[in-house]
Each structure stands twice: as C-alpha cells, then as structure tokens.
Amino acid sequence: MDVATSTKEVKEGADWDHAENHRLLVLAQSENQQEAEAATEELLLRNAGLVRSIALRFRDRGVEAEDLIQIGTVGMIKAIRGFDIEMGTCFSTYAVPLIFGELRRHMRDEGPIKVGRYYKKLGVSLMSAKSAFLVEEGRDPTISELAARCHVSAEEAAMALESMSPILSLSDSAFGEEEGVELGSVIPDEESSHEIDRLCDRIALGQAVSKMPPLWQKLVMLRFYRNRTQQQTADALGVTQVKISREEKKILDFLRKELLQ
C-alpha cells in the first residue's frame, strides 16, 4: 500500500468519525426523548476515555476515583446538551472546560478537606484556653503560649486553629458588604486554565496525528515520544536518514496547517 492510499484511508476514517459524532450530537439534542437518550449514551461511551483522563487529575483530594468519573460525566452530559452544532467547533475542545468546571465546582462546594477528630477536639481546647488567657493577661496569646497551655507543639496548635477557621465560598463577596464582586473573580486560577489549555493542545495534536499516513505516525512516535535520533528512526523504519529529515519537514508543515485552522 502506497503513502497516497494510506493518507486517503486515514482521512476517510477521520471524516467518518466526525460525521458520526455530528449525527449523534444532533440526535442527542433532538426532542425525541428515546433517540436523545440513546445518542447521549453512545456519546458518553465514545468519550469515556476523555472524561476519565480529566477526572483522575483530581485524585488524592479526598474523593474516590469512580466518584470523580461520575462527576466528570455530568460535565460531559452538559457539554452534549449545550454544544452548538452549527459553530463547527471540535466537540472535545468544547467539552474539556465543562468537565474541568464540574469537577472544580464539586471540590469547592462539597469541601473535600476533612479535619481529623483530634484536631477538632484540640481546636476547641485552644479556643477555650485563648479566652482564659485573654481574661487573665488582657491580651491575645501567641501560638506558642497557647500551645504551652494545652501541652502540644506550636505546629499542632497552628493546624488545629486553622481547622477551626470558616471556609470561604468563592461566591462570597470579595470586599465585605460590597456587592457584585465575588471572591472567585479576584483569585487567579492560572494552574487550572493552563491545564485546560495544555489538554486542549494535546487533543488537537492527537487529532492531527490521527490524520497522518502510517509512516508519519511511526516517525512521530519514534522521534518525538521515544526520543530516537534520526538515524535510529531511519534504521527502525528501513529508510535513510535523509528520508527521515525530509519527512520531518513535511510533517511540521502539515501540523502547522492543521493546528492553525
């Protein structure tokens, strides 16, 4: 099979996949409840890997992996229902921020931070000791003075007092009584936004690579994922080093066109 034939087959496969995705999205947003439910279920199955990859980024934050996936799935369902089919935007690119947003909203609203019983009990003791110290000395005690009274380390006292502090919601007013400015709007979330951008870039890159002929896909894997040299890649593919160099230039031109569309 020559390169031209392979390229045609890959392109036809990608076009079919896009057309099928478009068909399912139309059905999922239709007024026919039975068809909409079936199409939504199929879209959830087709995008289960995307939801899982995003959900598992929130591991080790006090929520079970399966629960995270269920929360991410809610975001995917919202994406299916809210996607504007006529815009021509890639569905996965639209869905990623909604899945991230649903997971972050759950973490914010449900409060995954769990305070141990020991620190809760210690916090109560420290607050009582603070009140007694204020009456006796006429001033607020330092952390060290409180810790000494309760026979704990200053670090433990600080952690216990921190656990007693009220948790602020991102929807609370940022400036006291002033309305219209929420706390969440003045706290930058650069890490999350960068994470979404990186994931969207990887999705776009993956889609572009899937349209390449098999030779190019193998070359990309060897050169840029396994860090092989041009000569090592040439040996693995049974071609010359000059051939690899030429194909790399073609690949870069192809990617620029695909990613700048």
Image (cartoon, rainbow, N blue to C red):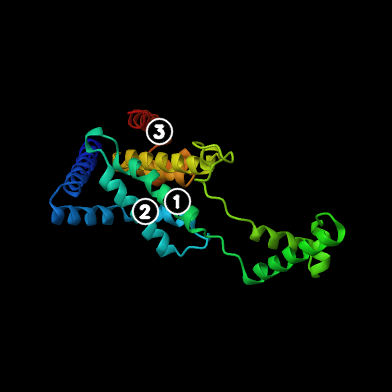
The secondary structure type at the circle numbered 1 is helix
* Amino acid type indicated by mark 2: Val
Residue 207 at x, y = what percent? 32, 41
* Amino acid type indicated by mark 1: Arg
Alpha carbons under labels 2 and 3: distance apart: 32 Å
Residue 15 vertical placement versus 24 (above, below): above
The secondary structure type at the circle numbered 3 is helix
Question: For this rendering, which residue is in front, 19 or 180?
Answer: 180
Q: Nearer the viewer, mark 1 or mark 2?
A: 1
Within 10 Å of disc 2 (Cα), the crowding (few <14, some 14-19, many 20+) is: many
Is residue 72 shown left or right of residue 19?
right
Q: Which residue is mark 3?
A: 248
Question: For this rendering, which residue is in front, 82 or 57?
Answer: 82
**Residue visible at 22% across and 34% down in the picture:** 86
Residue 174 at x, y = what percent? 56, 40
| Quadrant of res 145 | bottom right
Is residue 140 shown left or right of residue 63?
right
Query: Looking at the figure, which quarter contains the C terminus?
Result: top left
**Residue visible at 28% across and 43% down in the picture:** 82
Earlier residue among tags 1 and 2: 2
Is residue 42 shown left or right of residue 192?
left
Alpha carbons under labels 1 and 2: distance apart: 16 Å
Q: Which residue is mark 2?
A: 51
Question: For this rendering, which residue is in front, 215 or 61?
Answer: 61
Q: Which mark is residue 105?
A: 1
Is residue 238 shown left or right of residue 211?
right
